[in-house]
Amino acid sequence: MLSVLIPARCEPYLEQTIRNVLDNARGEIEIIAILDGYIPDPQIIFNDSRVRFVQTKKRLASAQPLIRQRDCRMVST
């Protein structure tokens, strides 16, 4: 299985990026969009089990680990 991580900070093309990855993917794939300290407006919803969103409570500095359990919450799709 291929895992695609998409880090995003106020990314206006996030939904389009995810759709492009899904459209061009071959084989088993999962997409994990990491929303770094923000919530997209309007909210992005995918009814596809291959897409997950992880939202951090605050922006993470690049030197810190990308995902820390106490700073993140899973956002349902």
Image: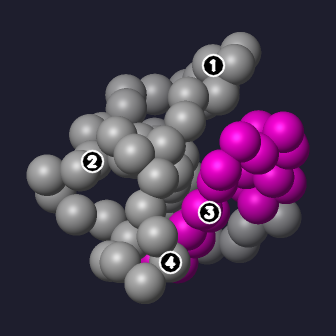
Disc 1, SS = loop
Q: Amino acid at mark 1?
A: Gln
Colour approach in the figure: one colour
Q: Nearer the viewer, mark 4 or mark 2?
A: 4
Of marks 4 and 1, which one's residue comes earlier in the chain?
1
> What span is colored magenta in the figure?
1-22
In the displayed structure image, the side of residue 29 where residue 75 appears, left or right: left
Q: Amino acid at mark 4?
A: Ser
Q: Residues within 10 Å of mark 1 (few under 14, many from 20)?
A: few
Q: Which residue is mark 3?
A: 6
Q: Residues within 10 Å of mark 2 (few under 14, many from 20)?
A: some
Dots 4, 3 in contact, CB < 8 A: no
Of marks 2 and 1, which one's residue comes earlier in the chain?
1
Q: Which residue is mark 2?
A: 72
Q: Amino acid at mark 3?
A: Ile
Of marks 4 and 3, which one's residue comes earlier in the chain?
3
Q: Residues within 10 Å of mark 4 (few under 14, many from 20)?
A: few
Dots 4, 1 in contact, CB < 8 A: no
Q: Nearer the viewer, mark 2 or mark 3?
A: 2
Q: CA distance from mark 4 to mark 3?
A: 14 Å
Q: Amino acid at mark 2?
A: Cys
The residue lying at 55 percent from left, 68 percent from top is: 5
The residue lying at 56 percent from left, 29 percent from top is: 39
Q: Which of the pair 18/11 is nearer the observer?
A: 11
Q: CA distance from mark 3 to mark 1?
A: 16 Å
Of marks 3 and 1, which one's residue comes earlier in the chain?
3
Q: Which residue is mark 4?
A: 62
Q: Nearer the viewer, mark 4 or mark 3?
A: 4
